[in-house]
Image: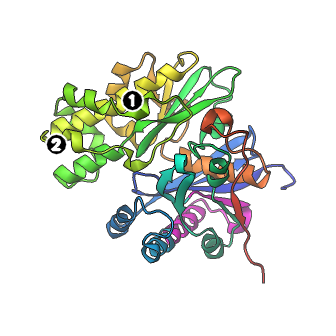
Amino acid sequence: MPASGLFTAVGLMSGTSQDGVDAALVTTDGRFKVNCGPALTVPYAEPLRARLRSILGCAPGERESEVNEVAAEITRVHAEAVRRLLRESVTPARAVDVIGFHGHTILHRPHQGLTVQIGDGAMLAALTGIDVVDDFRSRDIAEGGEGAPLVPLFHVALSEKLERPLAILNLGGGANVTWIGAAADPIAFDTGPGNALLDDWVLQHTGRAFDAEGALAASGRADLRVLARLLVHPYFDHRPPKSLDRGDFGLDELAGLSAADGAATLTAFTAEAVARAFEHFPEAPQRVLVSGGGRRNRALMAALGRTLPCPVMAVEEVGWNGDALEAQAFGYLAVRSLLDLPLSLPSTTGARRAVPGGRLHRIRVA
């Protein structure tokens, strides 16, 4: 352990939006001391994004050679993200104690005891010269948990001085929420789709990667009958803890809608799914802080503002970086892994106990 008790970590996140790798520097004791430093994003080239999309849903052993090739390629992008972050922040690699490497989720089926994140931790350690912690989710799954979401304990640490109850909503490819009360353990779960379905729709109908600032949705009108059918999905009847795979929702119900009306309907769907989450909170939060790319979607933020019973604002309002929050979290969790502290709680994933986790890859010293 460093003499100061504080570790310097690089956290890495490749989310279900498949847009690239977020990298962030964090200094932390793995408990309540957290100082978030510089962060950046390295986008995936479109050919790699296409290859990544093509292997989504692959179970272990399926298309193994292709999956391994993509895993190696995204590991190299992660290594470049680390090198670029350290170069731009003028931080020597020897000053970093650990890298938290989430990898990229291609399959998440916790009810089958299965979650698959691709990426080679040993390779990343060799490429960067820094110890790496990966495999954050499997021990939670083995303890009967959902393996997700894993960010809540970081949310608790980061929000220690904020008024509670508080909800922190991440709008990435999927959407997940952490409810933090004054005394009780946090509650966390996936609420439903975030940006992924909307991104798929926009790509299919316009060729663009996403609905920039929600302009397409704002030009359309939500189809309430289609929205009602989307909300009948059995996931919404399940009590948390619960989690989703990117492929658990599809676009079949939207057949026949215009590009704009489909975008408006999917935007309303994300907001209504978040509203359903409020039914599971012990008491209403005083506000909702929003991170992830979805906070830049004006139509979605407006829909949340209309739908939720409390103020909704981007996490920048409290001084956080909404693009880097999940990467920062995995830097923090890597330090907790080194200290053998829990990464999840029964109230956040449904595991039988508070579960430590992660797998350490040490650099080889000649």
Q: Position of residue 272 (x, y in %)?
A: 35, 26
Q: Position of residue 36 (x, y in %)?
A: 63, 45
Residue type indicated by callout 1: Ala
**87 magenta-colored:** yes
**165 magenta-colored:** no
Q: CA distance from mark 1 to mark 2?
A: 20 Å
Q: Position of residue 35 (x, y in %)?
A: 67, 44
Q: Which mark is residue 255?
A: 2
Q: Position of residue 314 (x, y in %)?
A: 46, 32
Q: Is residue 45 left or right of residue 224?
A: right
Quick one: SS at disc 2? Answer: loop
> Which label's residue is closer to the chain start, 1 or 2?
2
The residue segment tinted magenta is 75-102
Q: Is residue 267 left or right of residue 60?
A: left
Looking at the rendered image, the disc whose residue lies closer to the viewer, 1 or 2, is 2
Asked whether 354 or 159 is in front, the reply is 354
